[in-house]
């Protein structure tokens, strides 16, 4: 006999499985790569089997939640389907622990646990999303922009004490640096013997990542007239970008969030503080 608490948990399991089934099918239907589409449809079929397993205990047919499936469908288009699939499967690590607590209570659940632990993990490892091979180029552009431009803007803040001048100088510096980084990535990729990356695409990914970061960091100086407020918002933006990208990479690479976040944050803040001090010294020395 299943108690009410266990039944409530099973209903939630069933709901998650049917949601994942719909999300995976929607992703597969949007793909041009038939190999990845086939793999993802296999994942979708597995989730449907899991839903039907729980249906025997709930006595109900679960309906997908449109808000949830729509949200993850949107994420797959913006951040990539590999990220979404890994994000969903990472959530299922907690689900597996919950499944294990039901061993001895739910007949056949050992099959479900094995399916979650082994089969789906091997299928996910087969995914080969094209743009992920350029993740290193994106990281290069993002890291460099965060460190260089946050430091530059911090130094210019005390040197100029004028948000428009700071924004103009930062924009010119940022565009020049983006072009330089893109060119360097092109040449670097071109000389690599064992690489599947196309040099031009690698350069474009690096340049775009740099330019987008530049735009976010300069925006506070165009919105606020008080340069200290602009500086505070800019540094908050730096932390927000680092947090978002650290989470993104930690999911894709199955690594700890703190590993990426702490190192990137420490470097960016350190460079910004040093530049801030130099800006103050230079301002007084040159008497701007």
Image (cartoon, rainbow, N blue to C red):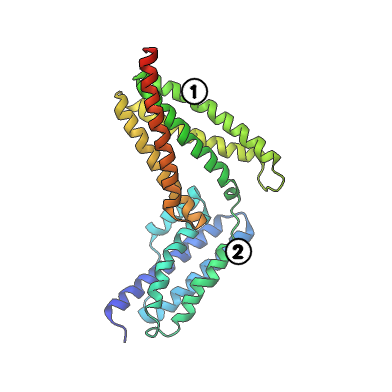
The one nearer the camera, 282 or 164, is 282
Q: Is residue 88 left or right of residue 232?
A: right
Looking at the picture, tell me which residue is in the foreground, 40 or 5. 5
| Percent of width and height locating residue 11 | 35, 73
Density class for disc 2 (Cα within 10 Å; few <14, some 14-19, many ≥20) is some
- At a point 40% along the width and 77% down the height, the residue shown is 100
Q: Secondary structure under badge 1?
A: helix
Camera-near label (1 vs 2) is 1
Q: Quadrant of residue 205?
A: top right
Q: Position of residue 231 (x, y in %)?
A: 34, 30
Residue 244 makes an appearance in the image:
no
**Rendered view: 13 above or below 189:** below
Specify the quadrant that holds the N terminus.
bottom left
Q: Which residue is mark 1?
A: 172
Q: Of the residues under marks 1 and 2, which one precedes in the sequence?
A: 2
Of residues 4 and 74, the one nearer the viewer is 4
State which quarter of the image contains the C terminus: top left
């Amino acid at each position: 006999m299943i108690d009410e608490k266990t039944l409530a948990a099973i209903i939630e399991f069933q709901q998650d499985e049917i949601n994942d089934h719909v999300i995976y099918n929607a992703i597969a239907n949007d793909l041009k790569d038939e190999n990845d589409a086939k793999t993802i449809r296999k994942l979708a079929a597995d989730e449907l089997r899991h839903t039907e397993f729980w249906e025997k205990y709930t006595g109900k047919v679960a309906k997908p939640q449109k808000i949830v499936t729509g949200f993850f469908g949107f994420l797959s288009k913006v951040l990539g389907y590999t990220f979404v699939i890994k994000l969903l499967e990472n959530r299922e690590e907690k689900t597996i622990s919950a499944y294990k607590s039901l061993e001895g209570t739910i007949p056949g659940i050992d099959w479900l646990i094995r399916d979650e632990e082994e089969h789906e993990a091997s299928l996910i490892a087969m995914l080969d999303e094209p743009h992920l091979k350029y993740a290193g180029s994106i990281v290069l552009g993002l890291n460099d922009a965060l460190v260089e431009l946050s430091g530059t803007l911090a130094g210019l803040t005390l040197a100029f004490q004028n948000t428009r001048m700071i924004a103009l100088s930062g924009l010119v510096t940022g565009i020049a640096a983006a072009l330089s980084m893109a060119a360097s990535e092109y040449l670097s990729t071109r000389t690599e013997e064992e690489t599947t990356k196309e040099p031009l695409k690698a350069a474009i990914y690096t340049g775009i990542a740099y330019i987008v970061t530049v735009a976010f960091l300069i925006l506070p100086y165009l919105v606020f007239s008080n340069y200290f407020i602009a500086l505070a918002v800019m540094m908050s933006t730096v932390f927000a970008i680092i947090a978002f990208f650290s989470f993104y990479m930690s999911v894709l690479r199955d690594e700890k969030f703190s590993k990426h976040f702490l190192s990137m944050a420490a470097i960016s803040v350190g460079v910004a503080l040093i530049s801030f001090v130099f800006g103050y010294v230079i301002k007084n020395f040159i008497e701007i």
